[in-house]
Amino acid sequence: MLSRTAENLYWIARYMERADTSARLLEVGSRISLIPSAHGYRSEWDSLLQASGMAAGFAAKYGDPVQRNLESWLFFDRDNPSSVASCITAARENGRIVRTALTSQVWDALNTAFQELKLLEREERSTLELSRLTDWVMRHAAMVRGAIDATQLRNDGFNFLNIGYYLERGDNTARLLDVKYYVLLPRLDFVGSGLDNYQWTTLLRAMGAHRAFHWAYGGEVTAAKIAHLLILNPQSPRSLITCVAGMANHLGRIAKAYGRDTGAQAAVQAMLAELEAETVERIFDEGLHEYLTRFIGGSAALGHAIHDAYLSGEMR
Amino acid sequence: MAGKQSQGGSNGAAAYFNEMTGMGADLRAPYARLQDWVQSMPVELRSLKQAEAEALFRRIGITFAVYGEGGDPDRLIPFDMFPRVFAAAEWARLEKGIKQRARALNAFLVDVYGRGEIIRAGRIPGRLVYQNEAYEKEVAGFTPPKGVYSHIVGIDIVRTGPDEFYVLEDNCRTPSGVSYMLESREIMMRMFPGLFRENRIEPVDNYSEVLRRTLASVAPAKCKGDPRVVILTPGHFNSAYYEHSLLADLMGVDLVEGQDLFVDGEFVYARTTEGPKRVDVIYRRIDDSFLDPLCFRPDSMVGVPGLMDVYRSGGVTICSAPGAGVADDKAVYTYVPEMVRFYLGEEPLLQNVPTWQCGRPDDLAYVLDHLAELVVKEVHGSGGYGMLVGPKASRDEVERFRALLAQDPGNYIAQPTLSLSTVPTFVDEGVAPRHVDLRPYCLVGERVELVPGGLTRVALKEGSLVVNSSQGGGVKDTWVLAE
């Protein structure tokens, strides 16, 4: 297929997944800010924006983090390329460009999300409950994902869509997990306290992994169990290992279909091998934040390798 | 669809030919079965169906952006459910005339980029051709595969009586609107399957197949095996992007932008996820001047550097061929009947609208004396902009055009205001006659082919003769009945 078509498909998936994450960030931030804390409201929102890589843009436009501004920034603001509105618009625009590579159900799901977004934007902001906004995003993200799974032909386009999803999701899981690091950074003595556990639980809820945690581990919520669930557990749909294995699978199918390997396959296999050999103890020895930072860097490098091999059209 | 212009202006008392009832109240045969259909449709059902049609159009994504108007880029073009019908015999006659004209236009193009016989013979003034902005010196002396310059010829036709058809203008470059022909039919078949059982209507859905075959038939000599065909679009911001993607989809070919193609050696390649793939035929939907920044506009970002060199050395075919525009210029239009006689040795089957060339002193004098009755158009204008519809214009507007004509007469032509035929159309009050025109799409490759149907545009405003979608026009399904 045309490299540009593959690129558009890949970005549809990335933008939809990113919209989902921005909504979850908004939810986790709001919940954390509802509980009393030693260092106040402000630093927690700061840290959340830091982890998501949206802090500088927010500070430049709004200054102090006020709840209403944060909602605007994460949901509606077109100046924020990662806001829900920006992501859904970009996903739909990428879809419009490659309409012929999408089934009508997938196009319908993308287009409906976009049309409803325009209606939401016209509503009086004070009547919009935060939970309604986040539910709305998750519903539409799921509808697009479901339409892709149920109706798309299992060809190279399908593989590029999935690669986009897994790459973005892995990156986002790492960033959401990193929020916890930022939130707690000033007071390490909180670790293991009741407050600490509450914050971990909030994080699990935001990732829709609260139930899964109890099914998989049960008992006390501990940092080690959560890190295992979100990094190393192949049963978790958001874990880093699940995302990397997903990419390895789809990149492998592409290599087979095209009859050749590229730097992207080598990079993803190396990442997967490392994750498979990893333990929670070693991650904590290295430092969770340091580990996640390294993962985010590796994930970005893999993104570049995929781009160079397939999406840039430079391969000869 | 950047539509072209139909005649405008109504001269009040004139009686119009109604394609359903003729000049009086007789029911004409092609419409016989539609009488019951429309009479038996309750008002509620009608509005329900209209809403359904609109939902389908929006869902499919057929929308139309009007250049320079801003507003909603996802605007829908209005669709009227009342079909426009041609009897088999009527169509057979039109078809002959359309194909004849398409052949003559292509013969003319080969000639004026070659020996210029028609000019040497004194049948067309040389300056109209060689000094024409659309004359592409870059391709002089080059003959494209199979001698075809214009592979898709859109001929705009109006009707003024049972047997009177006039060609308003020819579109030899990249006529748009064929997606409306295809989608209008799809939607009508979905909503009114009964109509298609009762009437024997020739199908149009093989258009994409005929188009693909036509494009493949003009592959360059250097192409061995199955030619790779692509559609070249300016991109998704273009108002006709939906049409480009629909045609690519129906033909099963890639829809590319300039950035997706590159030249290497003597061929053009597409950038794909599997590496470069050679491209043999490019159905381009961009203007000549944007094709190749090395040859035409150096500031163009949408073109493919080096494309013209490959084209001229026979490595790729470009459809329509660069330079085809010189045949559909409004000043050259006057001479199309001459072309038919000169190249084919036949009498033209379709008539031109009488046209005054304002560049000629005698013609200009006549036009200035009769401005209030005439339609005046810019020679290179399109889309119904920059024109005067005398009978509808205010005194100020007429005077403004008088000044323009005095300034640059060669830039204008004038035509009489035609009494365009009408077809019954659904309006708020029920059903009422509205003026229409017709654009069939003639395909020219190894063979000359015409799918039985076309785009019927309808002026939805009462009394209006302007059918352009940018100015309140809509579309209808166009039926050709089988024998």
Image (cartoon, rainbow, N blue to C red):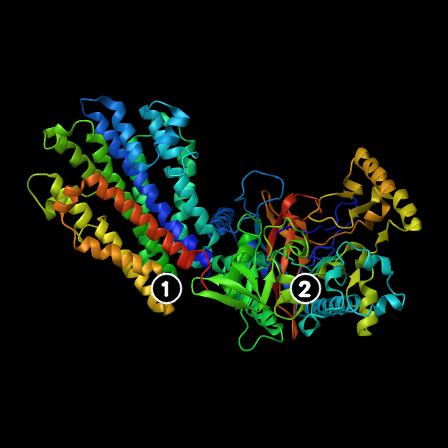
Q: Which residue is mark 2?
A: B321
Q: Nearer the viewer, residue B346 or B160?
A: B346
Locate residue A204 relative to residue A121 in the image: left or right.
Answer: left
Q: Position of residue A238 (x, y in %)?
A: 23, 48
Locate residue A9 relative to residue B392 in the image: left or right.
Answer: left
Q: Position of residue B381 (x, y in %)?
A: 73, 48
Locate residue A164 relative to residue B337 in the image: left or right.
Answer: left
**Residue at the spot 80% in from the left edge and 72% down from the top edge:** B343
Q: Which residue is mark 1?
A: A155
Residue A174, above or below B272: above
Name the secondary structure under disc 2: loop
**Residue at the spot 72% in from the left edge and 51% down from the top edge:** B6
Q: Which mark is residue B357?
A: none
Residue B419, above or below A197: below
Q: Residues within 10 Å of mark 2 (few under 14, many from 20)?
A: many
**Residue at the spot 7% in from the left edge and 39% down from the top edge:** A220
Task: Name the quadrant of the C terminus of chain B.
Answer: bottom right
Q: How many marks?
A: 2
